[in-house]
Amino acid sequence: MPKIFYLLIIIIMTGCGSSVENVLDVVIDEPDRKEIDTSIMGANAFFNDGRFGSLPSQANEIRNTIKLRRVRVLFAWNDDVQPFPNEPVNFSFYDDIVNATAGAGLEVLVILTGVPSWMSDDLNWTSDNNPRKTFVDRWVRKVVNRYKNRAHIVAFEIWNEQNERNEPDNVFLDLRDSPVNYVEMLCHAYSTIEDLAPTKLVISGATTAINQNYPANINYNEIMRDNGAEDCADIYGVHIYGNQFENFERSGGVKDFLNGLSRLIWVTETGAQGINSQLEYAERMYPYLREQIPDIQRIYQYQAFESTPASSTYGLRNLTAGQTLSDLYIHLRDR
């Protein structure tokens, strides 16, 4: 039996110094399960846990076993890659990712995010005494310049979940509560990438799930849009988790917002927890998104490999003995 969601519409009537609120229940059926269009599908893969095999073997498992040809990978600027401001960046791990994904024939979307601890000293800010521009000039520029000739890297996503309350880097760069500051950083990155690698796509950073935490998350996105985010990205990025279909359907909700954008849309993270929940979620959410929001061009499952317990993992594969493969992994492998 399908689950039913309730969207509360509040009608406020005012006049003659009095007000009346009428609350109407609008019933929204959970979408039916339908076949997944795997041609638009990719997976998040961070390649940072050797218990899942060597980096090349993980890349080949994605391409050849579960038969996906796109991955979203993380290139974080942190103390591990540049512990001091005057040291060169150690790109060795990221070089390994680039080489392994190329060898496996995967198409790559790179997330650019993070700041090392020494960025807390404003003497290390190199661009207009602005930490956000410094992130672009000291990290985005270097990464793009290094990999601009690697054809299988097709896009760069600027930051990740910039409104996340518990991410210290969002506080440090003053992004958490300021969509305007995020757009400033995005536009500086867009201009930089256009100059260095005009054939690469720029993806706007996705907030936490746009269909959750209503209306805060969609409000953040609306301010991004209103301050020029679409002019500074080739693709609009979003994350979608959970079953808040009512927030898609409400007037002025997620569906109206996304269908009003002038850019194509990539869902750069989505998924469900638990090895027996992922297939049903994908079969309900993916077709619903494509039907209701036609400009969604790609959907990246979160994530390929994760070491959390089978009952709560987002991983298509995990490390729980006897329960390592999710139902979605098996579906993808056997299709």
Image (cartoon, rainbow, N blue to C red):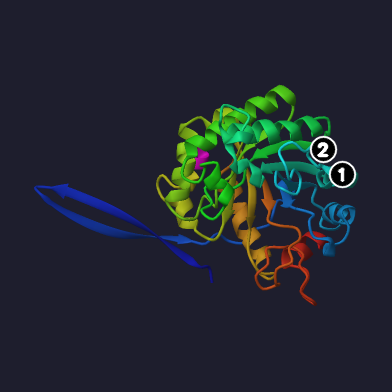
Q: 216 or 290: which is nearer to us?
A: 216
Picture quadrant of residue 166: bottom right
Q: 121 or 40: which is nearer to us?
A: 121
Q: 67 or 290: which is nearer to us?
A: 67
Where is residue 42 drawn, in percent x and y?
73, 49
- Residue at horizontal 67%, vertical 30%? 137
Q: Where is mark 2, residue-wise?
A: 152
* Residue closest to the far left: 16
Q: For mark 2, give the secondary structure.
A: loop
- Residue at horizontal 64%, vertical 65%? 280
Q: 200 or 248: which is nearer to us?
A: 200
Type of amino acid under label 1: Gly
User: Is 134 situated above or below 97?
Assistant: above
User: Residue 105, which numbered label?
Assistant: 1
Where is residue 229 drawn, in percent x and y?
54, 33
Q: For mark 1, give the secondary structure.
A: loop
Q: Which residues are magenta?
A: 257-261
Where is residue 283 drawn, in percent x and y?
65, 59
Residue 303 sits inside the magenta stretch: no
The answer to whether any part of residue 293 appears in the image is: yes
Could you tell me if the residues under marks 2 and 1 are in contact, i.e. CB atoms within 8 Å? yes
- Residue at horizontal 56%, vertical 32%? 130
User: Badge 1: few (under 14), some or many (20 or more) residues near its Cα, within 10 Å?
Assistant: some
Type of amino acid under label 2: His
